[in-house]
Amino acid sequence: MTIAIDWAKVNLQEYPNMVSAEVPGPRSQEMHERAAGIMKGYSGQVKLFPVVFDKGHGVTLTDVDGNTYLDFSSGIYVTTLGHCHPKVTEAVQQAAGRLMNCHDFTTPIKLELLEKLTGILPGDLSGVQLYDSGTTAVEAGLRVCRMATGKSEFLSCFGDFHGKSGHAVSLARMNRANGPSRTPGFYMMPRPNPYRPLFKKPDGAIDTDAYLAFYDTFITEATTGQVAAIVLEPIQGWAGSIFPPDDFFPKLRKWCDARKILLFADEVLTSMGRTGKYLAMEHWDTLPDVVTLGKGFGNGFPVTAMVVRKPYAEAVESISASTSYGGNPMACAAALASIVAIEEEGLLENALRLEEYFVPRLKKMMAEHPVIGDVRCKGCLMGVELVKDRVTKEPFDEAGKQVYQRAFRKGLAWIPAGHILRMSPPIVMDVDTAAKCMDMIDEAIGETEKDLGYKN
Ligand SMILES: Cc1ncc(COP(=O)(O)O)c(C=O)c1O
């Protein structure tokens, strides 16, 4: 497969380039202050670095002061194919001039998307409904699980994130939501994290079977026995790019089948090429019963999907699944153009080519920096865990904050995450640009170590 990403090639003489004396620059500061007087509830990402972006192209961003950045987070894991991908932009422009919304009637572009999507998804994942946010797709998936099984309870996992509606927050850590209480029938359990294992074999290796055995005990002791589904992110995104051990999902699939519990993979963050596959679950040859797609699905246009295996398609008919905006022509055009771009530009292959660069580079950084406790990468999804001490593995939040801000000031636009550096560059990046981004992080870690009294 030829990789065709010339349109996103970066002139590294011009990017990144910080032209204002301080960053965020004066125009950013002035505009953000005015906006923040009105707009409430900005994310931590913005509060830590309140820059005002003006435009983006491919893997680059430009702020209102003229500073230019390399994007190492695809916005918020969203612009997987780069900012303003020409195919996606043109498709949305055309759709906007033709027909913007007609409820959930079939349109030619919707038909084309549905056939294309079911063609790239594995197995019999063939029943689709379209939505406008990851959260609404997850909510619909939960309703399908209840309808299909006649059961009402859900299991989810520590560290996972599934959105911010009442049920979605009930699938995750509640203290961030600070207000609502967990919906009855929603339960959380630990999942295997190879760097911080809870259940270990006598030789110290993570014990996946012990986790599954614990789930059985948990169901007996804590639920009414009416578990419809277990809902998981294949790879924990917000928790810090945490990968499961390779035997976890194949074993979980069998565990679910034996108990008639549905396996619901929330791939809002991990799908559509992020890890070098359309679904991250493909890395473990595991077919979920229900899957949600989002973020990179429309490469910035709000379009998401809830997809079920054939046996559960009838259940979707019974949940009044449609919405006002789900599957509107612009959304379908964006999602279709994104899949076409992945195919025509060889972007799954490019994500894997980048992984080949990232993995040894991350290992080299770990060898050189004592504050790095663990590094991980699949495709263009990476995590670097900063610890005060490699033996105690105590999380090093101050280091995480400093590295984030220092690298941003050098021109790296990315996402903060406590002590875990999370990186998710657009999969249209070339290796030279990826190396430049890693240089900035490497330098920022070195400067932070010096500042905090660590030797490297
Ligand atoms: C795994 C996962 N599920 C669901 C969501 C919610 O998606 P949205 O913000 O589009 O509602 C997110 C958002 O980050 C996510 O990462």
Image (cartoon, rainbow, N blue to C red):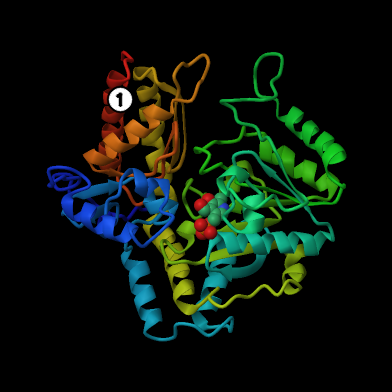
**Mark 1 near ligand 1 (CB under 8 Å)?**
no
Q: Residue 232 in the image: x percent, y percent?
A: 65, 46
Label 1 secondary element = helix
Q: Residue 28 in the image: x percent, y percent?
A: 22, 54
> Left of 382 or right of it: where is 239?
right
**Residue at x-position 57% and y-position 71%:** 115
- Evaluate whether residue 107 shows in this view: yes
- What residue type is disc 1 on? Thr
**301 is higher (above) or lower (below) than 183:** below
> Left of 441 or right of it: where is 102?
right
Q: Residue 29 in the image: x percent, y percent?
A: 23, 52
Which quadrant of the rendered structure holds the C terminus? top left
Residue under label 1, please give it: 448
Q: Residue 428 in the image: x percent, y percent?
A: 34, 52
Give the quarter of the image for residue 370.
top left
**385 is higher (above) or lower (below) than 367:** below
